[in-house]
Amino acid sequence: MSKKIISKIWKGINSIANKIYKKILKSDIESEGSDNSGYKPQPVDTKNKNISYDYTSKDKYILTLVISIKETELADSLKSEGCLTRQTAEKLFESKQWLLYSQEKHWKDTCQGLFENPHQESDEYDVYYIKITLDRPDERFSRDSNMLKMYDAFKELAEKENKIQISERQPKESYENKGFYRV
């Protein structure tokens, strides 16, 4: 084959690949925010591979994690440090059992009591709740997110100064019917 023919074939393949990429990118953008949280990010630049979103929502978002009572050392570390380090963020990612990512209003309506009620009896299945107030929405914590995206989001939490609150020991059943999902 001559170089001209190979060059034309290569250009055609690149053109088709670019069209497919744009369709996939458009589909991903349209499906963002479908977790019923009421938030849908708006793309700023769809022609650029590095899409940034315009987070105009003034609502705060709350990330609440459920970890086993066996992770008392992690909970104590978070209490004493008052913030996430890279190590504690990775440990928290590995230790989480259930997660709830929601707007602050929804959280206050359904979960505030988890941090107000001291637990009376001890059980080996008890849990701690870790509440992290986010400075902006981050759909990588949503129910539909994949674990790789969520892992990256956890690592980034360590780079920010988010407000963290750790509950007292609570019974495992306390998170039922509040919207938590298994991760």
Image (cartoon, rainbow, N blue to C red):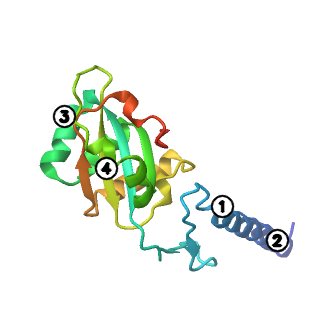
- Tag shown at residue 31: 1
Q: Is residue 146 above or below residue 124?
A: below
In this rendering, the label closer to the viewer, 2 or 3: 3
**Outermost residue toward the top in this view:** 124
Left or right of 168? Residue 16 is: right
What's the distance in space between the residues labelled 4 and 3, CA to CA? Answer: 17 Å
Left or right of 171? Residue 6 is: right
The residue that appears at 41% across and 52% down in the rendered structure is 109
Query: Label 1 is placed on what type of residue?
Result: Ser
Q: Nearer the viewer, residue 108 or 165?
A: 108
What's the distance in space between the residues labelled 2 and 3, CA to CA? Answer: 58 Å
Q: Quadrant of the N terminus?
A: bottom right
- Specify which label sits upstream in the sequence, 4 or 3: 3
According to the picture, the residue beneath numbered tag 3 turns out to be 73
What's the distance in space between the residues labelled 2 and 4, CA to CA? Answer: 51 Å
The residue that appears at 75% across and 70% down in the rendered structure is 14
According to the picture, the residue beneath numbered tag 2 turns out to be 12
- Specify which label sits upstream in the sequence, 1 or 3: 1
Give the image location of residue 95, x and y in percent: 34, 36
Check disc 1 and report its element: helix, strand or loop: helix
Check disc 2 and report its element: helix, strand or loop: helix
Q: Is residue 106 above or below residue 183?
A: below
According to the picture, the residue beneath numbered tag 4 turns out to be 131
Assess whether mark 1 and mark 4 are in contact (beta carbons under 8 angstroms): no
- Specify which label sits upstream in the sequence, 2 or 4: 2
Crowdedness of circle 1 by 10 Å Cα count: few (<14), some, many (20+)? few
- Specify which label sits upstream in the sequence, 2 or 3: 2
Crowdedness of circle 2 by 10 Å Cα count: few (<14), some, many (20+)? few
The residue that appears at 24% across and 31% down in the rendered structure is 119
Check disc 4 and report its element: helix, strand or loop: strand
